[in-house]
Image (cartoon, grey):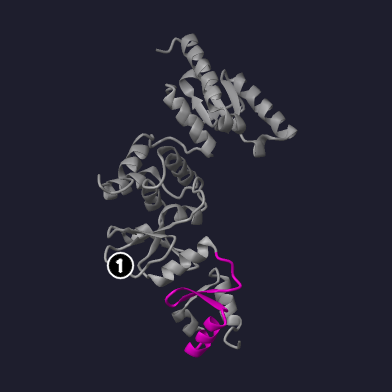
Amino acid sequence: MAAFNSALADHVHDRHGVVSDAELRSLGVTVEQRQRMVSERVLIRIFDGVYRLASTPETLEGRCRAICLAEPRAVITGRAAGRLRGLRRMGEVTVIDVRVPHFANTLTGPGIRLRRCNVLDEGDVDTRPDGIRVVSPARLAFDLGAVMNDLDLESVIEQLLDLRLVTMLELHHVCLRLYHHARPGSKRFARVIQSRPMWMKPADSHLEVRLFDALRRAGVRGMVRQHDLRLADGIVIHPDIAIPELCWAIEVDHVTWHGGRASAQLDKARDRRIREIGWLVDRVTDTEVDTGLADVVAELVATYRRLRAANRVA
């Protein structure tokens, strides 16, 4: 086992236990040594010329790295790319979507879905330090249109904007460049970004996206996210949802963030300061949104109508 030296151990440690023939040779492992490690199941073959160290657990990252080693033109996209970027609403990834040129035929295997496309600019691809090639955030948002519903895609776009990984201008440019009526996800992606104002600030969580969408569908108009609201002492706060025309703010309280007594007291103090400047504030919990969305929306819609009537808003 002299072939398994510290250099090889360090190499696979930072690369999810996955290594290629070329990398083994660069680390001084001979063909005979590699064959012996394979026969003794120290190395497990994944693709021709690509192996996983047997002592390393199989992970999404390891599978993606193996794909990128086996096919130099492969780029990870879809839900797998979303998981690699830490995005929400990805669910369990059982199939890895891989962008390859139309003429690429070297990559096959269970759990792999080839997304053939020759429209993949250099700016559409990011290469991670571990060697995994993944589509850029803007291209990922476009590609997710083929595998997500409107609400989840909207939520992911809000997260990308909140993390400052993309801008609305970049998303519109991607749409203009890639949109085609026959390209999967094009219509959904265009529909989602065209319904979102360029100037609106992003939502902090999926629950806020759900509530915003439900209120919008119920006919509530004039809503903005993270509205700049200046208190009497000059401090600016940002309610989750606001209708400035009605001086009305809605906050979504997350149990993890607002579950303690101290947090509740801070929220009440903040609400008093909001009322001091003539605004009304309503709070709903994440549990209410998650399990009783219809009831929450009905209550908020009733308040919305009452405020419109009181303010004589048409």
Position of residue 246 relative to residue 51, above or below, is above
Query: Residue 141 appears at what percent x and percent y?
Result: 40, 48
Q: Nearer the viewer, residue 269 or 219?
A: 219
Position of residue 282 relative to residue 58, above or below, is above
* Displayed quadrant of residue 76: bottom left
Residue at 38% x, 37% y: name it: 198
Q: Nearer the viewer, residue 61 or 229?
A: 61
Q: Is residue 282 left or right of residue 167?
A: right
In the image, the segment drawn in magenta is: 29-58
Query: Residue 68 appears at what percent x and percent y?
Result: 42, 68
Q: Is residue 307 left or right of residue 170?
A: right
Position of residue 10 relative to residue 139, above or below, is below
Query: Residue 309 appears at what percent x and percent y?
Result: 47, 10
Q: Which residue is mark 1?
A: 104
Is residue 25 in view from this perspective? yes
Q: Secondary structure at mark 1?
A: loop
* Displayed quadrant of residue 126: bottom left
Residue at 60% x, 88% y: name it: 2
